[in-house]
Image (tube, coloured by chain):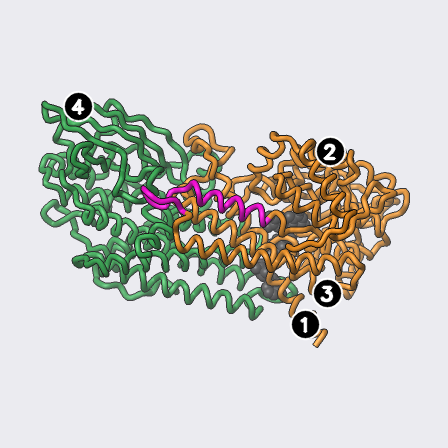
Chain colours: A orange, B green
């Protein structure tokens, strides 16, 4: 990326680098390098979040009066790039980038005061209750219902693929409060404490052997009405707003660039045969070059579109395009990493194994396979890439 | 519907059908998954039955009381095993039988081989080393002949698959003086072998092995002066059976995906009604046809004498096979949505089995480097 920084931005850039060199300690970086799941480890992410929060840099999508920071697109970009370069863990977006902004946009002042400080401090840890077994891409068909009885919502139903539900003390849910001819109109946005009576959580183990996902069951769960965000029936509007943030509100290219650099290093250490390293392979060189070029295009596209999104531009295809490009690049990189490690992909280091068949001794390259396996979900979560393509096409035709 | 390919011979058809019938009746994904979850994987549950049904005789020659199956016949059997995620070490068994049969060591042929065919002896291959990927021109494991004719063998071998309850390890080593290569068949309880066991990506038991073997009786030497061509031929055979296994996985993945799209509804419509998904399934089918054709092309050509050009062809077709099998499992996962990226459905396990097959006896980068 070619950036023509102003003096002010140069100053910020220096401040940022100084901050990272002091606060991003080696133990955090090392732990972060081990991340193979969609999200970083909870404790690690919260440790980093608390350092950023102290500096006032944790909540970039929030107004200053709630502890947020007003950065220009360039500053946001510099922040993500430098964090990725330095090896900082990814912040968990569920509170800071998802439910937080929804509460800010649709919540009452009382709700903002009640929920935002704990999101920022990490005292509350959130999960997202949107998808249901029968409602994935067709989210509006969701059936988990909340009925008003004696001044409380009574929630019944289930949610699935709920990332980190087993760590969370709150879940933000889309629930059906009314059966309406247009299904979207009967959906509401409800915040539910995870320790409520009637909630059970079933773990779902991922293809990589890791436990991030869960199924959450609600049986006559009582929820206070002041946990409703916005009006009854306004849930779909909240959901759409949040999904847009989920798909396009971060600078994905910076982390992709770090991954490319990491793979490059891997090609210098892994053997192609008894004499040569992988970086002598013509195929690998070609692949690295073409991924570099594709990433260069994406960096510029992302920066260009983010600027428009940040300036309040009424967006259509942009979040979908960014999501599609970022996730498919992520998959292409993960695929190359597995090709580079070659025979080592016969080994999937699994924490859970211990007795009859222990796990293999871990090795420096062992991030590659779980990363690849988990990257398969990138084109599924936050709206599948088929659905994103439907949205992009719709936007093209609407503007033709 | 995708399994209706024309078999080359009656025997391949009959064998494939009996394997298929037995595995349909006697294995299911649920118990497979439970054993992984509980860490009680047993790769030999059906091994005795494999022996009773005569399948272990398939790779052996007539003169050793075997059935004398061709590579094509064996591939047909392995396809069925791949479909059902069978953990039994059939490919390794076939290769071990062929290696011992082709040697000039009559003791091994008379003592070890019959018990292998009866399912009592099991061999694992210790070939590859971390420092050389799949290349065998510079293996570090070495042997030295002692004055009394016995051998010392030293070195470390990685990624030894199908290790559960083996009785013998087939080790490839080189002479520290002459660089000649030689296979040894070392009894597993011989002093000087240490094991680091683990479960592979495909849920099969594996190990890294360290050898500091002294005074190995010369009767365990398979054959001196093993040529590179002989090793390459063995690895070709290994890849063909692995590719057949992946073909079985792909057939299953396509069937499962097509069924899932027919069953699952979103937006009040069956997923199978969305044209973009129909096209992806059609592409999976096209890729499957490539995999099927190339696997059997390889199986038919491997028994013929190799020219340099033919070997290149095997390498390049392996690359094509790996790319197509990967395409199929990636799309199968994608079209299943969230459930596709979990351990709860066989889709993920079939995918991981293909990943392992595609890097067990050579991988894309290595094969490409051989022809670059
Ligand atoms: C790792 C991971 C984490 C997740 N975390 C969360 C979370 O924390 N909270 C939460 O609520 N959800 C979460 N999800 C769920 C995710 O949002 C859904 O998986 C996703 O919306 C797809 O739904 P589905 O899995 O039911 O697939 P389906 O909707 O059943 O789709 C199956 C296939 O059909 C395709 N398809 C469906 N409709 C169409 C169409 N109209 N046109 C073309 N193709 C179509 C899809 O693209 C897909 O390939 C997560 C998912 C994953 C994989």
Are labels 4 and 3 assigned to the same chain?
Answer: no
What's the CA distance linking mark 1 and mark 2? 43 Å
Closer to the camera, A177 or A235?
A235
Q: Earlier in the sequence, mark 1 or mark 2?
A: 2
Element under label 1?
Answer: helix
According to the picture, the residue beneath numbered tag 3 turns out to be A316
Q: CA distance from mark 1 to mark 4?
A: 76 Å
Which residue is tagged 4? B215
CB within 8 Å, label 1 to label 2: no
What's the CA distance linking mark 4 and mark 2? 62 Å
Q: Can you name the residue that lies furthest to the front here?
A: A7
Task: Please determine whether, in this image, residue B340 is positioned above or below residue B174.
Answer: below
Highlighted range, magenta: A256-278
**Chain letter of disc 3?**
A
Locate the N terminus of chain B and report the quarter of the image it occupies.
bottom left
For disc 4, the neighbor class at 10 Å (few under 14, some 14 to 19, many from 20) is some
Could you say which quadrant of the image residue B299 lies in?
bottom left
Residue located at (86% from left, 45% from top): A225
Q: List x then y, in percent, for residue A369.
A: 48, 44
The answer for which chain carries disc 4 is: B
The image position of residue B37, as x and y in percent, is 48, 37
Q: Which residue is mark 1?
A: A396
Q: Quadrant of residue B121?
A: top left
Does the magenta portion include A287?
Answer: no
Residue to which mark 2 is pinned: A51
């Amino acid at each position: 990326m070619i950036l023509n920084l102003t003096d002010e931005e140069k100053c910020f850039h220096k401040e940022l680098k100084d901050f990272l060199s002091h606060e991003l300690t080696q133990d955090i970086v090392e732990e972060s390098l081990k991340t193979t799941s969609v999200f970083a480890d909870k404790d690690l992410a919260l440790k980093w979040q608390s350092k950023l929060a102290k500096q006032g840099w944790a909540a970039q999508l929030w107004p200053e009066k709630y502890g947020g920071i007003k950065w220009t697109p360039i500053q946001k970009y510099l922040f993500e790039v430098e964090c990725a370069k330095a090896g900082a863990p990814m912040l968990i977006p569920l509170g800071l980038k998802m439910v937080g902004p929804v509460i800010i946009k649709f919540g009452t002042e009382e709700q903002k005061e009640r929920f935002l400080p704990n999101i920022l401090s990490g005292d509350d840890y959130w999960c997202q209750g949107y998808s249901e077994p029968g409602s994935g891409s067709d989210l509006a068909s969701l059936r988990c219902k909340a009925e008003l009885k004696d001044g409380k919502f009574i929630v019944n139903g289930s949610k699935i693929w709920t990332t980190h539900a087993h760590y969370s003390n709150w879940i933000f849910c889309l629930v059906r409060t009314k059966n309406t001819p247009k299904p979207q109109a009967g959906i509401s946005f409800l915040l539910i404490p995870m320790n409520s009576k009637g909630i059970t959580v079933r773990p779902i183990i991922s293809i990589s052997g890791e436990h991030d996902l869960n199924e959450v069951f609600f049986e006559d769960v009582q929820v206070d009405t002041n946990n409703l965000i916005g009006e009854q029936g306004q849930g779909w509007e909240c959901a759409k707003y949040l999904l847009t943030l989920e798909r396009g509100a971060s600078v994905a290219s910076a982390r992709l660039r770090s991954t490319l650099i990491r793979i490059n290093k891997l090609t210098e250490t892994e053997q192609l045969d008894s004499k040569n390293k992988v970086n002598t392979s013509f195929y690998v060189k070609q692949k690295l070059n073409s991924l570099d070029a594709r990433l260069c295009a994406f960096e510029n596209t992302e920066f260009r579109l983010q600027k428009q999104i940040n300036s309040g531009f009424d967006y259509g295809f942009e979040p979908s395009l960014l999501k599609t490009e970022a996730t498919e690049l992520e998959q292409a990189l993960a695929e190359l990493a597995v090709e580079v490690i070659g025979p080592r992909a016969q080994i999937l280091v699994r924490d859970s194994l211990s007795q009859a068949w222990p796990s293999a001794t871990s090795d420096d390259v062992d991030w590659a396979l779980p990363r690849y396996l988990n990257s398969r979900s990138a084109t599924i979560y936050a709206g599948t890439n088929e659905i994103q393509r439907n949205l992009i096409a719709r936007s093209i035709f609407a503007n033709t | 519907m995708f399994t209706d390919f024309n078999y080359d011979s009656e025997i391949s058809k009959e064998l494939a059908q009996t394997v298929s019938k037995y595995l349909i009746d006697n294995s299911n994904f649920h118990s497979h998954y439970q054993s992984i979850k509980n860490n009680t994987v047993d790769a030999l549950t059906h091994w005795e039955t494999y022996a009773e049904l005569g399948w272990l005789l398939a790779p052996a020659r007539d003169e050793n009381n075997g059935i004398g199956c061709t590579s094509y016949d064996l591939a047909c059997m392995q396809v069925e095993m791949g479909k059902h995620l069978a953990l039994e070490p059939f490919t390794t068994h076939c290769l071990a039988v062929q290696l011992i049969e082709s040697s000039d060591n009559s003791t091994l042929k008379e003592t070890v081989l019959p018990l292998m065919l009866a399912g009592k002896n099991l061999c694992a291959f210790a070939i590859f080393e971390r420092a050389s990927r799949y290349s065998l021109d510079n293996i570090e494991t070495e042997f030295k002949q002692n004055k009394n004719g016995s051998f010392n063998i030293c070195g470390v071998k990685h990624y030894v698959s199908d290790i559960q309850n083996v009785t013998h390890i087939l080790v490839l080593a080189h002479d520290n003086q002459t660089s000649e290569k030689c296979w040894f068949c070392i009894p597993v309880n011989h002093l000087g072998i240490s094991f680091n066991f683990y479960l592979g990506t495909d849920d099969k038991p594996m190990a890294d092995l360290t050898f500091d073997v002294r005074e190995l009786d010369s009767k365990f030497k398979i054959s001196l002066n093993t040529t590179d061509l002989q090793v390459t031929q063995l690895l070709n055979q290994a890849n063909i059976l692995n590719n057949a296994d992946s073909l079985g996985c792909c057939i299953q993945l396509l069937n499962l995906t097509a069924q899932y799209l027919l069953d699952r509804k979103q937006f009040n419509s069956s997923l199978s009604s969305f044209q973009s998904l129909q096209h992806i399934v059609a592409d999976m089918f096209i890729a499957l046809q490539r995999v099927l054709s190339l696997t059997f092309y390889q199986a038919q050509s491997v028994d013929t004498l190799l020219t340099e050009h033919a070997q290149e062809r095997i390498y390049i077709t392996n690359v094509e096979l790996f790319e197509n099998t990967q395409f199929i499992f990636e799309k199968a996962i994608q079209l299943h949505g969230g459930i596709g990226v979990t351990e709860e459905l066989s889709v993920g396990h079939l995918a991981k089995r293909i990943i392992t097959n595609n890097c067990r006896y050579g991988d894309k980068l290595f094969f490409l480097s051989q022809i670059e």
